[in-house]
Image (tube, rainbow, N blue to C red):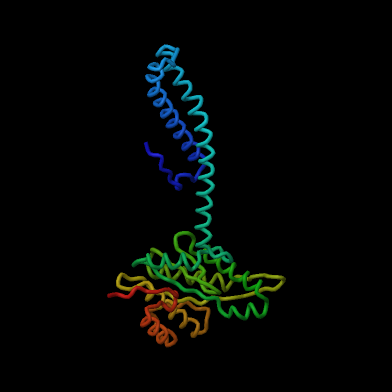
Amino acid sequence: MSLQVDLGNFDSRGAVYNFALKMTFRAVLLAFLFNLAVLPLGYALGLMPLSLADAVKLSVAGSWLFGGAVSGALALLTGHVIRELSVSRAEFERLSRTDMLSGLLNRRAFNAALAETGPGASLAILDIDRFKAVNDGHGHCAGDEVIRSVAGILREVFEDEHLIARLGGEEFGVIIRGGGLAQRIGLVERARNLVEARVIRCDGAAIHTTISAGIAEFASDLRPESVYSAADCALYRAKAGGRNRVVHETEEGNCDRCDKPAAEASAAGMNPFIGEPVPVAG
């Protein structure tokens, strides 16, 4: 008879009542077995004036009345406490993976997903164009509103099928799963078009913005940081090519900005774009 408690089972009130019911039956059974065990001792010592049948009936009633009622109430209270702890733990975990401004996943959650993604997916790194000019011209509140608006568009385009995260500042990352390459690129283009068409209003000002994006493909022979580096270089080419563009890693162009930092970081065993140690093969 196991008394082990799994906090994952306390995600609903029904689970709490189920827990209390199980604990009540266990308590009743234990109380009844205890009473049966002490009955012979009571008769041997002359402390039991009742007949055996009456003593058994009294044991059953006492087990339910005291063991069942008291343990049931305590189990119900304990179950509610455990459920609150379970809900709090789940909420804490969710908050630790969420960017508070945009409501998207944060970099921690993105890095974890990046390491687990395999072939058949694309990585898009998106950056709001001339974001500093928005902050300088309209204030940081307007900048925050622009970030929230772009995040909303990304949610609208990619929905729950793909992973969307704010990587920091005005930069976002999307892991696009499934479909063909053209379809995945088309989703990023759709997001770019929607951002370009959106008018963001803040304190009476109408703000227009655009995004640039770089896309790279996951492959079985590529490490996640290599995919990130390729997408980041494609983003750099999109910026250098005039902004408000989507560039795939296969498009021709140089990325001198990435070569030297990447080489230096690789020699140091670090990923220059994710900012975390990279395991070095033996």
Q: The C terminus is located in which quarter?
A: bottom left
Eyeballing the image, is 29 above or below 42?
Answer: below
Residue 198 sits in which quadrant? bottom right
Image x and y of residue 186, in percent? 45, 70
Which residue appears at 52% of the width and 50% of the height? 87
Choose between 9 and 216: the one closer to the eye: 9
Image x and y of residue 223, in percent? 34, 73
**Quick check: can you spot residue 70?**
yes
Q: Is residue 23 left or right of residue 194?
A: left
Q: Is residue 206 left or right of residue 31?
A: right
Q: Is residue 107 left or right of residue 226?
A: right
Choose between 237 and 260: the one closer to the eye: 260
Residue 25 sits in which quadrant? top left
Which residue appears at 39% of the width and 22% of the height? 36
Which residue ends up furthest to the front in the rendered image? 45
Choose between 154 and 278: the one closer to the eye: 278
Image x and y of residue 70, in percent? 52, 31
Residue 59 sits in which quadrant? top left
Image x and y of residue 165, in percent? 49, 67
Q: Is residue 194 left or right of residue 121?
A: right
Which residue ends up furthest to the left in the rendered image? 282
